[in-house]
Image (cartoon, rainbow, N blue to C red):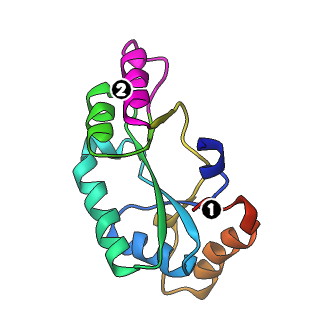
Amino acid sequence: MVKAFLKLPAMVVHGLGQAEWALRVAAGRPALLVSAPGAALNAGPGWFKSVLDQAAAACPDATIHAVLDCAAAPGAALAALRAGFKLVVFDLAHPAAASVLGAAAEAGAEVLGTRPAALDLGTLDPRRRDDERRIAALFATVPPQDQPR
C-alpha cells in the first residue's frame, strides 16, 4: 500500500499556510504532505498533526496522506505512531529499528527508510503564478488510476 501513496504528488510543507496552499492547488485530488526533515524532533508529531487537521478543515474536499520525518529518533517515531501517523521516516540502520518497525506493524503503519521525493514548498512563493503552476504540474503527472483515496 505504501508504494501507491508514494505515487501521489508529494510536497514538503513547513507550516499551515503551505499545507493549505498545497491542498487548494490539489483541488480535491489526493496529496502526500511530507514534513520537513526531522520535524518530529523539532516541533513534535502533535504540531504536524495539528497543521494537517487545520489544513483539512480549511480544505474539506482534500484527501491528505502525510509523512512525518523522525530522522534517527526512535522516541519521536514511536510518538508519531501513537499520534496516528501511518507513514513515518526513520533511519532503519538505527539499533532500535526493529522496535519501531514492530510498533508500526501493530499500528498498521509503515516506516520508510528514506524520505520520498517531494517538491519543497519552502522554496516557492504563493504570490508567484509560476510557483503555483509548478505545484499544479505535479498533479498532472499522476493518472487518476494511480491516485489512491
In the structure shown, which secondary structural element does the residue marked by tag 1 occupy? loop
Residue type at numbered disc 1: Pro
Determine the residue positioned at 43% across, 44% down: 86
Does the segment drawn in magenta span residue 99?
yes
Residue 10 seen anywhere in this rendered image of the structure: yes
Residue type at numbered disc 2: Ala
Q: Which mark is residue 121?
A: none
* Camera-side residue of 2 and 16: 2
In this rendering, which labeled residue sits more in front, label 2 or label 1? 2
Is 101 rendered above or below residue 8?
above
Mark 1 sits on what residue? 9
Q: Closer to the N terminus: mark 2 or mark 1?
A: 1
Q: Residues within 10 Å of mark 2 (few under 14, many from 20)?
A: some
Q: Residues within 10 Å of mark 1 (few under 14, many from 20)?
A: many
Q: Position of residue 41 (x, y in %)?
A: 28, 40
Q: Which residues are magenta?
A: 90-108
Q: Position of residue 83 (x, y in %)?
A: 27, 45
